[in-house]
Image (cartoon, rainbow, N blue to C red):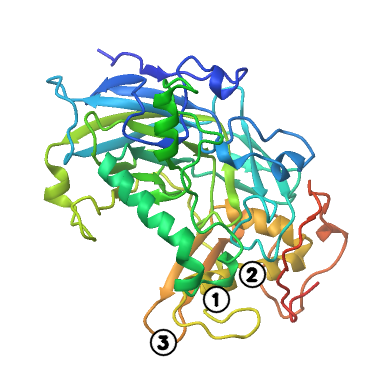
Amino acid sequence: MAPPNKKLVVPIDLKKKPREQELPLHNRWHPDIPPVAEVRTSEVFKIEMVDWTGGAIKDDNSASDVKYIDLSTVHYLSGPIRVVGADGVPAQPGDLLAVEICNLGPLPGDEWGYTAIFDRENGGGFLTDHFPCATKAIWYFEGIYAYSPHIPGVRFPGLTHPGIVGTAPSMELLNIWNERERELEETGLQSFKLCEVLHSRPLANLPSTKGCFLGKIQEGTPEWEKIAREAARTIPGRENGGNCDIKNLSRGSKIYLPVFVDGANLSTGDMHFSQGDGEVSFCGAIEMSGFLELKCEIIRGGMKEYLTPMGPTPLHVNPIFEIGPVEPRFSEWLVFEGISVDESGRQHYLDASVAYKRAVLNAIDYLSKFGYSKEQVYLLLSCCPCEGRISGIVDAPNAVATLAIPTAIFDQDIRPKANKVPVGPRLVRNPDIPKCPYEGNLPTTKNPSASV
């Protein structure tokens, strides 16, 4: 007999705002956010989710929604979901929760997405000192393929995945997060030598009541006020998984998440149709609403058995990821190298961030020779299935990073040739991409040797 239909545990109505959904969403990590549903191990269940901004970014030709977005409200997550075994015993602290992705995709009737560059003073991105203006590209889906009217001449299959899958932290772990991130925010600029690309961005996003959604907990109550002041933002990945943005976690993948609270309290969101390694523009995948079909198993005592703490407590662990068998197949790549020397020519010591920045800048400048604006290339490299690598991290003083781009995604040959870069009307692209002017006062970085 065929298995029963997948149980829909978190439905989404795209006509409603996040706070109006049947089951309330949340955008913080805290052990006291109550679960909205319960599932048993071995049963396949379905979760629907809004895009990470809750519908704030629109399918139109204006980037003003990107420029003025309220980032205090992201990410909107579906859950938490309490997981119990076949015997009715919930997952316990110290267990591992094995979460298998059985199926996923965009919500039916909402087959579009977007990639964006945030304004430098409202989010920024990896190359925010080079690209300070809010910019947006809309993508439409044709089955497994994506194309954009804002970046013509490109079409590629998406490796669809959730950006966020995570379990709730314990109060002890939450306090560890808040303490170390607060210390970084307060003393980081004085105590750390940071890559210049990071210096003007927030060093951490500390707990804040502004824009806080706590699921079933009613806003304005003393309980809400207490939890909102403690709850961690969902921006970075941490020991609980969270916002890891691993593009290969698609169909057939499995995530082994540490359990810190009774029932695990699994949450997910931030669906991506496609993403490049690093998601460099920050709002850099093809962001979309979507669904996941999941199956969970509980490995009792799995944290101690399989995860070695890398820190002062048994809580300092990290998840394990098992990549699924379904990926786009590309046979030809153009690879760009970067070393840890910045645009001013200054040497950095084995700094992989500077090296990767250099690789991305090299790729942007090269591809802009083929009829694209640099903003278009920056957005493309953030969301197409490109592969980032740390190729060398021991040969002092230079770290070496590479960015590999599949050549088949373009409708022209982008390889270097003896007869120089081709010219002609066929290569003229549409530079009219939704973009807002930068009106701030922060300095921008210019490469004196780059092409215009």
Q: Secondary structure at mark 1?
A: strand
Q: Secondary structure at mark 2?
A: helix
Instruction: Check disc 3 and report the residue beneath it.
Output: 396
Instruction: Check disc 2 and report the residue beneath it.
Output: 361
Marks 2 and 1, Cα distance to the nearest angstrom? 9 Å
Looking at the image, can residue 231 be seen? no
Residue 308: where, in percent of width, then height? 18, 57
Is 190 above or below relative to 139? below
Label 1 sits on what residue type? Gly
Kindly indicate whether the residue at mark 2 contacts the one at mark 3 (C-beta within 8 angstroms).
no
Could you tell me which residue is drawn at 36 percent across and 28 percent down? 33
Kindly indicate whether the residue at mark 1 contacts the one at mark 3 (C-beta within 8 angstroms).
no
Residue 149: where, in percent of width, then height? 75, 43
Residue sitting farthest toward the right: 425
Q: Is residue 390 left or right of residue 70?
A: left
Is 397 above or below relative to 279? below
Label 3 sits on what residue type? Ala
Using the image, tell me which numbered label, if any, was put on residue 338.
1
Who comes first in sequence, dot 3 or dot 2? 2
Q: Of the residues tagged 3 and 2, which is closer to the observer?
A: 3
Q: Nearer the viewer, residue 286 or 203?
A: 203
Kindly indicate whether the residue at mark 1 contacts the one at mark 2 (C-beta within 8 angstroms).
yes
Could you tell me which residue is drawn at 80 percent across and 49 percent down? 436
Marks 3 and 2, Cα distance to the nearest angstrom? 22 Å
Residue 49: where, in percent of width, then height? 49, 28
Who comes first in sequence, dot 2 or dot 1? 1
Looking at the image, can residue 293 be seen? yes
Q: Nearer the viewer, residue 6 or 22?
A: 22
Could you tell me which residue is drawn at 62 percent across and 30 percent down? 55
Quadrant in the rendering for residue 371: bottom right
Using the image, tell me which numbered label, if any, was put on residue 105.
none
Label 2 sits on what residue type? Leu
